[in-house]
Amino acid sequence: MRAARLLLGAALLAMFAACAPMKVKQHAATPEALAAQDAREAALAGKSHWTLEARIAVSGANGGSGDLSWRQDGDAYSFSVRGANGKTLRLSGDAGRAVLEGVDAQPDVGSDPQALLRERLGTEVPFAALRRWALGLRVAADPAQMQFDERNLPTQLVQDGWTVDYLDWFDDRSPPLPKKVFAGRGKDKVKLVIQSWSLD
């Protein structure tokens, strides 16, 4: 068991090292860039039903990596990660309930998905904010600082103590959607390499 944990830790460190944020040309938030961001957010405001497929890596004592399938239906969500060992971890729920399956024989139930992941896995995933950040959107209630590229697409978002780097975009979509998202706060890190988006 200890050897398996060491191997997982080494693999995770290697993945994070390989996926460190790349240097991209960026500029401060100009009026034009902020207007473009406002337009993207307005276009996506009504898109509360979506699915993404991605590779995910999460730091922490029991962090790891795997294939992620995330479906959002309004406030209801299903966040399922399949690891290299074939084991599946599934987080599901809605605005007032979170259910974590795959850790023990019986599901763990709570009211806050972020707290449930922290308590059961020792990982810090800003779940509610990540729902917005994955789309390249700001959390409306919190102040944010942003950097943009020459296309006026976000390259970095700093909000609620987290730094979110956008390394690539599906810019052939309208509006564009993120392809590579790297969120970090101190030792806590979450990386998404998104393979596909489906918006209803």
Image: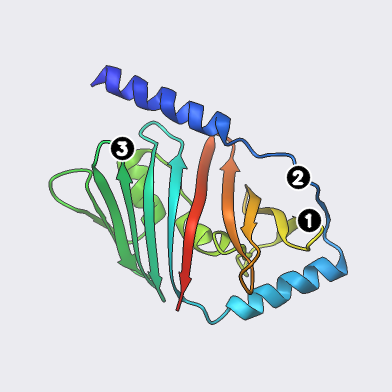
Q: Is residue 65 left or right of residue 163?
A: left
Give the CA distance from mark 1 to mark 3. Answer: 35 Å
The circle on residue 84 is 3
Q: Earlier in the sequence, mark 2 or mark 3?
A: 2
Residue sitting at x 56%, y 29%:
17
Q: Is residue 171 left or right of residue 11?
A: right
Judge whether 132 appears above or below 68 on screen: below
* Mark 3 Cα shell of 10 Å, populated few (<14), some (14-19), many (≥20): few
Name the amino acid, label 1. Answer: Asp
Query: Dot 2 corresponds to which residue?
Result: 24
Give yes or no for contact between labels 1 and 2 (Cβ–Cβ under 8 Å): yes
The circle on residue 149 is 1
Residue sitting at the far front: 172
Residue sitting at x 58%, y 46%:
182
Give the CA distance from mark 1 to mark 2. Answer: 8 Å
Name the amino acid, label 3. Answer: Ala
